[in-house]
Image (cartoon, rainbow, N blue to C red):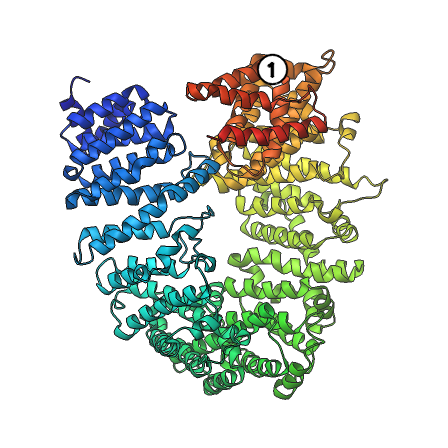
């Protein structure tokens, strides 16, 4: 490069050019500054002499990358750090904001990385203080340095081992964080009269960074609003107990500027301080009283609450009162009665301003629900006043939900909360506790408001045509809300165990309302409205209610202990025991399955309820006594369930037949099984009669897809040797040819092959030892031969096909399922694979040959990118290397190197499951080499000869894998170190020279002053480890490796 001017011009093009080609050229030319450590001095020269901010940005960002990605000598890092801090002092205020930010980040990053290496890195607080004593622009730079430093130390960096990150953060917390927090407080006090200035905002931001520090190293989820107890260090006690600390944040909030939210966030974290940080209960009560007084003033004045961010933060702050303090403490605090009155008024206003309040109101409901659940534990003489305010909040919540419906229904673009049942139940998490607090009054109020709505709904049912569809949709929305609330009330009975005869009677009364509603929804006009969205929302609410009602009152114990409920239900709706209630639920399930043809959400929800009932042993047995269930199981004309023929609901067919299978196999009757399978027999006969020339028609396609989904559901339900035998004998040999014919004709159509292959994958899965055949039975071998034919047929047809745009769906997904099928078959322990070679049967070899061809067609980058494919691929390799290593060793060099190379890539995968599978495969390979080549007297087997030749041709193969394993152990915190250690020992013992070379390579990447210590770590690693791979020696090496990692990563 000829000169600085040319470099500045290049930088201008890099950061400002609109031409992508020009930018790419500039990036390639300037890349050397961030990659080559020889350019560090040139970066400093650019900082000293360049005038263009873009050149300064290049130098700063390049240095940042250098110090982050390279292990630079200690003195060089200190020199860079000192240069940057002096540069910021002399030129900082004149720099462009983006350059200043980058330079401060560079200074903080190098300070963080060197915190444990030298005491001079820890002078950062003193150096920042020098800025704070100067003019405002230097003051701002000093605050920015401290702010970014706290954030940098608190933020885990991907390239930094987690153990070192925690040690740095812990040392920083002990040595600097408190001083920085005190600096922020001092700045806040000094700048209090400088209203609205940038320095105020920076000081407040610094306080928030300090209070948000991860004191315990638990790395909580920053994307969540929820924060746990803040584990403030004991040394912070004097500052926390000083009343001026809390007051300064309330004062800054009262300024009502853009930083008001940050002031509330600071108060939120202070309110969450751990109990034990205070000197005694008196000090803590004083702190609580001040918090109450401050929030009371905000509630009285309403200052700042017009801003939604402030409003949301304030609701979170109020919610923390009951999270961090006991109700008895709140009641005994000074000014409690005024405070709770204001909070109640604020809650009611928030409920009625539902459009403004949004999700913030749930923090307020959390405060009230936690308060009412604590009443029984309060022994204070002072009134808690909850009896006065909770009924108003219950009424306010329900009326606000009803009031909001018209707006939500008229807003076609907005999301209706009733559409997402799971989220809705989460939002109703707190409200039921309020209802059960004064259950009698609450249930009376709820029934009072819902009765006229149900009467209107019944009138609509008696009409011939719908007169006002909008009004009807509002009615159904109100009923859906009511039903969800009842469901939530029943749900907390399971969770909290709240019970009692009076509660059961109230449960019965509000449940009876919904049970009467169910009868209305499926009668008259409403029985013709299953396509309406509002009707579907109501039915989903009803299904949620039935799920929770069943869990509470139908089961092994609950049915016997719920006499009061059934006595009251008998009076109200004529259901005097759990069998009648179960029959009522089943009839609703059957009605939904018959009536809904297109709404997949309702169908899936209905099947989920049906599955829950069938899964319980007692409820499953009870179901079999019901005529409705018998009709569903043994019905010859399942076409009455029209959703089964709807393409959008084809996935639901599997769940439907899974439930049928579960109920069917509870009786263990072969006759009933054959009778129930008759509809599927008819489909088989129909498809088998189709000539080959017509087998590619749409009618065949959909029939075949449906059949495979149905069979998979039945197969999933077979959980015992006997029931699996029913299905296997039914399928083999008569019906297997159709499955092979399907894969032969439709191999290029994933809509067909995916369900077909998934069925086969389920069929070969030996769960619960269901595939245990008699010792004289050939069924295991016969099943594998069918699997081999299927995989070979599919592979030979899918491989020549060109890749489509959606390559995963069209090709990779099928290959992934084939890998799963073969994995399950190879490790199912129901086939003696030695038989195939003994009798010259090519079933095993053909299956493995085609699967290897499919593997070689997959780019390694795609395997790692598609996670389901990666999981299936590496699980297969583990089984292959464990059970059929001789096959791997007979592969050609290209295939062998590809597969073993992919194992090295898999070791680096962030999934510990995949990493462990690869380590096990490598261990099996290395153990074979050690046993048959390293210490073997002669290369007796062809497999050993092949492996020796392959390793001779690729001498760097094992050393590359071993180096990768060492890098993982040294630089990462993995939970699967035990698995990794197995592979490492096998590789180390293969060749001592290889181990010494890797040791030298690793040491060369560290500064010279650390070589002696690190070399000693390697020596200790092999201490007392013999030239053996027996279990005792392996355990010794694993213990040494644990100590090696700890000592190697130490300072």
Residue depicted at x 44% and y 78%: 478
Compared with 146, 640 (above or below) is below
- Residue 74, percent from left and from top: 36, 25
Image vertical order of residue 403 relative to residue 455, above or below: above
Instruction: Tell which of 716 and 748 is nearer to you.
Output: 716
Please determine whether, in this image, residue 903 is positioned above or below residue 608.
Answer: above
Residue found at x 65% / y 28%: 881
- Residue that label 1 marks: 992
Q: Residue furthest right?
A: 776
What residue is rendered at 46% in x and 87% in y?
452
Of residue 60 and residue 113, the one placed in the foreground of this image is 113
Quarter of the rendering containing residue 138: top left
Q: Is residue 292 left or right of residue 145?
A: right
- Which quadrant, please, contains the N terminus? top left
Relative placement, left or right, of 264 versus 7 is right
Residue 96: percent from the left, percent from the top?
17, 39
Q: Nearer the viewer, residue 167 or 771?
A: 167
Report crowding for label 1: few under 14, some 14 to 19, many 20 or more residues within 10 A (C-alpha): few
- Horizontal arrangement in the rendering, residue 573 relative to residue 56 (left or right): right
Does the image show residue 888? no
Image spot of residue 292 (x, y percent): 36, 70
């Amino acid at each position: 490069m000829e000169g600085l001017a040319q470099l500045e011009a290049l930088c201008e093009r890099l950061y400002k050019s609109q031409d992508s080609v020009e930018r790419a050229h500039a990036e390639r030319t300037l890349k050397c500054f961030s990659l080559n450590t020889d350019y560090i001095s040139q970066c400093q020269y650019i900082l000293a002499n360049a005038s263009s901010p873009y050149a300064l940005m290049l130098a700063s960002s390049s240095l940042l990358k250098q110090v982050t990605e390279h292990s630079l000598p200690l003195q060089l890092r200190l020199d860079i750090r000192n240069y940057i801090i002096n540069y910021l002092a002399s030129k900082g205020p004149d720099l462009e904001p983006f350059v200043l930010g980058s330079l401060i980040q560079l200074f903080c990053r190098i300070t963080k990385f060197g915190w444990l290496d030298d005491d001079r890195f820890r002078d950062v607080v003193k150096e920042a203080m020098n800025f704070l004593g100067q003019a405002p622009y230097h003051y701002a730079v000093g605050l920015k340095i401290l702010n970014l430093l706290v954030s940098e130390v608190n933020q885990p960096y991907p390239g930094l081992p987690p153990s070192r990150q925690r040690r740095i953060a812990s040392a920083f917390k002990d040595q600097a964080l408190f001083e920085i927090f005190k600096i922020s407080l001092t700045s806040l006090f000094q700048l209090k009269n400088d209203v609205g200035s940038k320095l105020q905002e920076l000081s407040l931001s610094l306080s928030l960074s300090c209070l948000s520090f991860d004191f315990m190293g638990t790395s909580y989820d920053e994307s969540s609003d929820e924060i746990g107890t803040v584990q403030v260090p004991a040394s912070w006690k004097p500052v926390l107990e000083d009343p001026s600390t809390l007051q300064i944040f309330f004062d800054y909030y009262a300024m009502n500027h853009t930083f008001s939210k940050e002031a509330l966030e600071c108060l939120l974290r202070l309110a969450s301080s751990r109990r034990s940080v205070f000197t005694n209960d008196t000090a803590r009560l004083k702190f609580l009283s001040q918090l109450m007084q401050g929030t009371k003033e905000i509630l009285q004045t309403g200052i700042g609450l017009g801003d939604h961010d402030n409003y949301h933060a304030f609701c979170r702050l109020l919610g923390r009162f009951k999270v961090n303090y006991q109700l008895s403490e709140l009641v005994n605090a000074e000014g409690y009665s005024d405070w709770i009155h204001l909070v109640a008024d604020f809650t009611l206003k928030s409920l009625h301003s539902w459009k403004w309040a949004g999700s913030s109101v749930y923090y307020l409901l959390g405060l009230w629900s936690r308060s009412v659940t604590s009443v029984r534990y309060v022994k204070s003489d002072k009134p808690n006043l909850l009896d006065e305010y909770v009924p108003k909040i219950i009424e306010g919540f329900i009326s606000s939900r009803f009031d909001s419906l018209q707006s939500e229904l008229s807003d076609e673009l907005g999301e209706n909360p009733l559409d997402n049942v799971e989220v809705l139940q989460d939002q109703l998490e707190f409200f039921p506790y309020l209802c059960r607090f004064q259950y009698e009054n609450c249930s009376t109020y709820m029934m009072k408001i819902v009765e006229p709505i149900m009467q209107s709904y019944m009138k609509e049912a008696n009409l011939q045509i719908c007169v006002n569809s909008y009004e009807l949709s509002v009615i159904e929305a109100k009923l859906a809300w009511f039903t969800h609330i009842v469901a939530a009330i029943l749900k907390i009975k399971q969770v909290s165990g709240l019970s009692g005869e009076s509660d059961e009677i109230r449960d019965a009364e509000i449940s009876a309302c919904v049970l009467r509603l169910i009868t209305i929804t499926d009668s008259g006009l409403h029985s013709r409205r299953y396509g309406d969205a509002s009707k579907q929302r109501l039915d989903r609410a009803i299904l949620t209610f039935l799920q929770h009602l069943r869990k509470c009152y139908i089961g092994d114990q609950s049915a016997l202990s719920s006499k009061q409920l059934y006595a009251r239900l008998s009076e109200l709706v004529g259901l005097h025991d759990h069998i009648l209630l179960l029959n009522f639920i089943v009839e609703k399930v059957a009605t939904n399955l018959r009536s809904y043809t297109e709404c997949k959400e309702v169908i899936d929800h209905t099947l989920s309820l049906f599955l829950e009932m069938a899964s319980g042993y007692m409820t499953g047995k009870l179901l079999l006594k019901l005529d409705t269930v018998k009709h569903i199981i043994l019905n010859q004309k399942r076409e009455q369930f029209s959703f089964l023929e709807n393409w959008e609901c084809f996935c639901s067919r599997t769940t439907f037949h899974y439930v049928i299978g579960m109920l069917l196999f509870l009786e263990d009757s072969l006759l009933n099984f054959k009778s129930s399978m008759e509809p599927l027999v008819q489909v088989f006969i129909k498809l088998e009669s189709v000539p080959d020339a017509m087998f590619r028609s749409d009618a065949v396609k959909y029939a075949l897809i449906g059949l495979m989904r149905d069979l998979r559901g039945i197969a999933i339900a077979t959980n015992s040797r006997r029931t699996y035998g029913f299905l296997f004998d039914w399928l083999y040999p008569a019906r297997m040819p159709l499955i092979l014919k399907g894969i032969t004709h439709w191999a290029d159509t994933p809509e067909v092959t995916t369900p077909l292959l998934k069925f086969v994958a389920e069929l070969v899965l030996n769960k619960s030892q269901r595939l245990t055949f008699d010792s004289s039975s050939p069924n295991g071998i016969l099943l594998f031969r069918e699997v081999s034919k299927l995989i070979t047929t599919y592979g030979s047809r899918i491989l020549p096909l060109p890749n489509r745009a959606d390559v995963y769906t069209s090709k990779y997904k099928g290959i992934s399922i084939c890998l799963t099928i073969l994995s399950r078959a190879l490790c199912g322990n129901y086939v003696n694979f030695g038989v195939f070679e003994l009798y010259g049967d090519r079933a095993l070899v053909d299956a493995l040959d085609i699967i290897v061809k499919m593997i070689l067609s997959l780019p390694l980058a795609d395997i790692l990118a598609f996670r389901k494919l990666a999981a299936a691929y590496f699980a297969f390799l583990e089984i292959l290397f464990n059970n059929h290593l001789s096959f791997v060793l007979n592969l050609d060099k290209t295939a062998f190197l590809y597969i073993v190379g992919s194992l090295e890539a898999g070791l680096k995968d962030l999934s510990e499951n995949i990493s462990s599978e690869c380590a096990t495969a490598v261990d099996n390979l290395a153990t074979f080499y050690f046993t048959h080549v390293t210490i073997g007297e002669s290369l007796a087997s062809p497999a050993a000869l092949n492996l020796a030749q392959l390793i001779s041709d690729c001498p760097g193969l094992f050393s590359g894998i071993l180096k990768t394993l060492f890098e993982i152990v040294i630089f990462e915190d993995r939970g699967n170190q035990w698995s990794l250690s197995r592979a490492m020992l096998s590789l180390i013992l293969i060749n001592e020279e290889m181990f010494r070379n890797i040791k030298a390579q690793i040491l060369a990447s560290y500064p010279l002053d650390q070589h002696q210590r690190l070399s000693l770590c390697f020596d200790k690693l092999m201490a007392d480890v013999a030239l053996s791979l027996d279990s005792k020696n392996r355990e010794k090496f694993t213990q040494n490796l644990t100590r090696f990692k700890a000592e190697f990563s130490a300072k």
